[in-house]
Amino acid sequence: MFEEQIITLSKRMLGRSVEYFDDFYHFRNQIFKEISSEFE
């Protein structure tokens, strides 16, 4: 499920297929950006 969603989001947001390391880190950082201050 996650892989299908990240491929769909990558195509929508980046206009291309997902590239493992760079894109996974980018999406992870975007997801946790809003709550990261809770972990400081």
Image: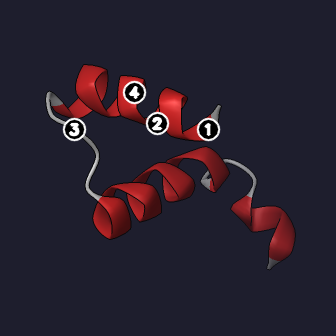
Q: Whole-Å distance between the Cαs marked 4 and 2?
A: 5 Å
Residue type at mark 3 is: Ser
Task: Estimate the x, y position of residue 17 in percent, counting from the top left.
Answer: 22, 38
Q: Nearer the viewer, residue 13 or 11?
A: 11
Say which residue appears at 85% left-offset and 64% top-offset. Answer: 38
Q: Are marks 4 and 2 in contact (CB under 8 Å)?
A: yes
Identify the element where label 1 is drawn: helix
Closer to the observer: label 3 or label 4? 3
Residue matched to label 4: 9
Q: Are marks 2 and 1 in contact (CB under 8 Å)?
A: yes
Residue type at mark 4 is: Leu
> Which quadrant would the N terminus be assigned to in this image?
top right
Say which residue appears at 60% left-offset and 45% top-offset. Answer: 31
Q: Nearer the viewer, residue 14 or 35?
A: 14
Residue matched to label 3: 17
Residue matched to label 2: 6
Residue type at mark 1 is: Phe
* 10 Å crowding of disc 4: few (<14), some (14-19), many (20+): some
Q: Which mark is residue 2?
A: 1
In the visual, does 33 lie left or right of 11? right
